[in-house]
């Protein structure tokens, strides 16, 4: 069972405040509206929506507690951010061969050690440098999917 499945019916990977409140109710968390807003603001980090994976990961880890014999009720499942990937693919294809080559060069520049690991802020910088104008949450979704 994935928490997101019960409220994110369009499979966007994000939750609005109303969807977040519904999700909390579905898992048995009864909070007053002010507490829901505070919790939402914590996960939203200034955005209008929150990343389902971030919330699901947090709740899955908290739900298992410190007992290694207890399996969390919810699983963390990466969801393909298909609309974002389609948008980026179209932009890269417009540029022809140089589109993907330029992006690859930027990622190679960031990963000078060859460890094939880059932090989120470097990933975001490379994508912006390559001309991709996405919301902060969209960069996070892409990064988390490929991480």
Image: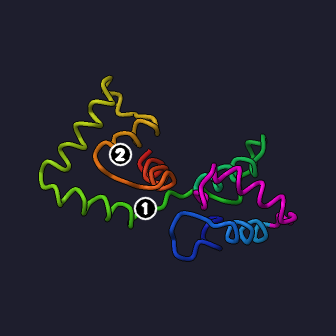
Q: Residue at x 71, y 68 (%)?
A: 23
Q: Quadrant of residue 68?
A: top right
Cα–Cα span, label 1 and label 2: 21 Å
Q: Nearer the viewer, residue 44 or 147?
A: 44
Which label's residue is closer to the chain start, 1 or 2?
Answer: 1
Q: Which residues are magenta?
A: 28-52
Q: Quick one: quadrant of the N terminus?
A: bottom right
- The residue that disc 1 covers is 80
Q: Circle 1: is it few (<14), some (14-19), or many (20+) Cα within 10 Å?
A: some
The residue under the point 31% across, 42% down is 129
Task: Give the percent coordinates (x, y) of residue 76.
Answer: 59, 55
1 to the left or right of 120: right
Q: Nearer the viewer, residue 109 or 65?
A: 109
Asked if the stretch drawn in magenta spans residue 96, the answer is no
Label 2 neighbourhood size at 10 Å, few (<14), some (14-19), many (20+)?
Answer: few
Tell me how many marks there are. Answer: 2
Residue pushed farthest bottom? 9
Say whether residue 112 is left or right of residue 6.
left
Please check the rendered image and state whether residue 39 is part of the magenta-colored stretch, yes or no.
yes
Query: Mark 2: which secondary structure?
Result: helix
Residue 38, label in figure: none
Residue 35: give x, y in percent of width and height. Answer: 83, 58
Q: Is residue 73 above or below residue 19?
A: above
* Numbered mark located on residue 128 in the image: 2
> Can you give x and y, in whole percent of width and height, for residue 40 in the image?
71, 57
- Look at the image and tell me whether residue 138 can be seen: yes
Q: Horizontal placement of 20 versus 135: left or right? A: right
Q: At 19% from the left edge and 50% from the top edge, which residue is drawn? A: 99
């Amino acid at each position: 069972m994935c928490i997101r499945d019960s409220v994110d019916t369009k499979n966007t990977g994000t939750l609005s405040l109303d969807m977040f409140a519904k999700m909390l109710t579905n898992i048995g968390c009864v909070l007053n509206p002010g507490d829901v807003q505070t919790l939402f603001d914590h996960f939203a980090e200034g955005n209008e929506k929150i990343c389902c994976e971030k919330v699901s990961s947090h709740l899955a880890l908290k739900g298992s507690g410190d007992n290694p014999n207890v399996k969390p009720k919810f699983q963390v499942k990466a969801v393909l951010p298909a609309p974002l990937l389609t948008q980026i693919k179209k932009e890269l294809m417009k540029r022809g061969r140089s589109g993907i080559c330029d992006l690859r060069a930027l990622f190679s520049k960031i990963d000078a050690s060859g460890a094939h690991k880059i932090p989120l802020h470097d990933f975001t910088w490379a994508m912006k440098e390559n001309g991709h104008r996405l919301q902060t949450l969209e960069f996070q979704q892409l990064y988390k999917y490929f991480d």
